Image (spheres, grey):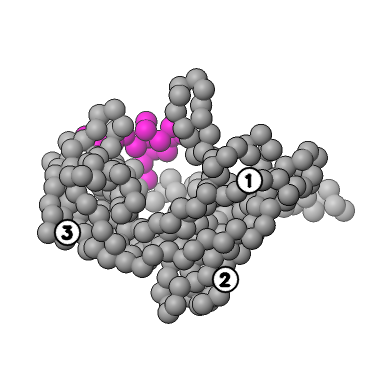
């Protein structure tokens, strides 16, 4: 009986998929054009301002499974203008990093500042976006504990922390924990971001106003326990970034039976996000308990 049910389910699924394929081939797809896609998150704590500019894949275009830079190459002939708080600058393109970059000395981002971004590319409509950097200082990070676990079959270390929501409502948070390690081959530092067994990378006080947000990291190999190389950051983010990040996290591109999730955008005339964040970083003591 079980084998019969399985066969029927597989046959029904095959029928549905073949019907969908036939339906798609019989429908004349409406014309669609590429749009400019912009990603830029500005912060008073960053030493540079970056603006990534790309083109979207038109609707119903062929899908390939190449690396991101091959599927969505950067737009290199854009004019990128940033203004706000009595400043204005044209952000040049960095050929080596394939993005538009400017140092903080040339354009300063301040807490509470309001900024406007404009991007112009030949043969595309000018696009623009605005954002306001959160003015408040993020809440303090309290390291509440750490320990050794053998849940994966070997001794590994984890730590716990929390922070308290700021007074009043309307706060959105981005919470990251990471290990900074040195690559001996290229003499560069990299960040390895830790996942959470408890807590979420994105948080809102809409249903947790004035309360504590509690976190526990997944276990980490003991070899990483070096002085001052593990840290936690909490960023106050504007609602634009929160909505964008939530929609990206909810997007399921590989599940043919999932409902399509539209990606949030605050770019007028294009796609993507222009947002402001204000961050606080704290190192984590790594003494073994």
User: What's the mark number on residue 133?
Assistant: none
Residue 161 in which image quadrant:
bottom right
Residue 136 in which image quadrant:
bottom left
Q: Nearer the viewer, mark 1 or mark 2?
A: 1
Q: Nearer the viewer, mark 2 or mark 3?
A: 2
SS class of the residue under badge 1?
loop
Residue 131 in which image quadrant:
bottom left
SS class of the residue under badge 3?
strand
Determine which residue is flagged by label 3.
Answer: 84
Residue at the spot 33% in from the left edge and 47% down from the top edge: 46
Counting residues from the N terminus, which is met first, the one under dot 3 or under dot 1? 3
Label 2, label 3: how many angstroms apart (C-alpha)? 35 Å
In the displayed orientation, state which residue is furthest to the bottom: 168
Determine which residue is flagged by label 2.
Answer: 212
Counting residues from the N terminus, which is met first, the one under dot 2 or under dot 3? 3
Q: Residues within 10 Å of mark 3 (few under 14, many from 20)?
A: some
Whether residue 189 is visible here, answered yes or no, is: yes
Left or right, residue 51 beside residue 183: left
Label 1, label 2: how many angstroms apart (C-alpha)? 23 Å
Left or right, residue 41 beside residue 130: right
Determine which residue is flagged by label 1.
Answer: 286
Residue at the spot 28% in from the left edge and 37% down from the top edge: 99
Left or right, residue 180 beside residue 124: right
Boundaries of the magenta span:
60-76
Residue at the spot 32% in from the left edge and 58% down from the top edge: 276
**Along the viewing direction, whichever of 29 and 108 lies nearer the viewer:** 108
Q: Position of residue 90 (x, y in %)?
A: 14, 44
SS class of the residue under badge 2?
strand
Label 3, label 1: how many angstroms apart (C-alpha)? 41 Å
Q: Is residue 65 above or below residue 32?
A: above
């Amino acid at each position: 009986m079980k084998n019969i049910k399985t066969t029927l389910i597989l046959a029904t699924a095959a029928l549905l998929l073949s019907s969908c394929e036939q339906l798609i081939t019989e429908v004349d797809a409406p014309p669609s054009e590429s749009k400019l896609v912009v990603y830029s998150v500005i912060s008073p704590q960053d030493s540079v301002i970056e603006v990534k500019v790309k083109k979207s894949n038109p609707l119903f275009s062929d899908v390939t499974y190449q690396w991101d830079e091959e599927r969505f190459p950067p737009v290199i002939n854009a004019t990128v203008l940033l203004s706000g708080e009595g400043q204005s600058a044209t952000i040049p393109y960095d050929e080596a990093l394939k993005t538009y970059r400017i140092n903080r000395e040339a354009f300063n981002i301040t807490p509470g500042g309001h900024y406007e971004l404009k991007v112009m590319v030949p043969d595309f409509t000018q696009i623009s976006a605005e954002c306001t950097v959160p003015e408040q200082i993020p809440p303090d990070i309290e390291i509440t504990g750490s320990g050794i676990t053998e849940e994966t079959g070997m001794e590994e270390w984890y730590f716990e922390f929390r922070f308290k929501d700021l007074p009043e409502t309307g706060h959105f948070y981005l919470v990251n924990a990471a290990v900074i390690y040195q690559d001996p081959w290229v003499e560069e530092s990299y960040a390895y971001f830790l996942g959470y067994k408890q807590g979420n990378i994105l948080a809102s006080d809409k249903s947790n106003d004035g309360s504590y947000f509690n976190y526990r990291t997944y276990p980490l190999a003991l070899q990483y326990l070096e002085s001052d190389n593990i840290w936690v950051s909490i960023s106050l983010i504007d609602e634009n970034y929160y909505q964008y990040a939530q929609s990206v996290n909810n997007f399921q591109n590989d599940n043919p039976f999932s409902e399509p999730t539209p990606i949030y955008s605050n770019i007028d005339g294009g796609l993507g996000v222009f947002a402001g964040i204000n961050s606080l970083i704290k190192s984590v003591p790594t003494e073994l308990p």
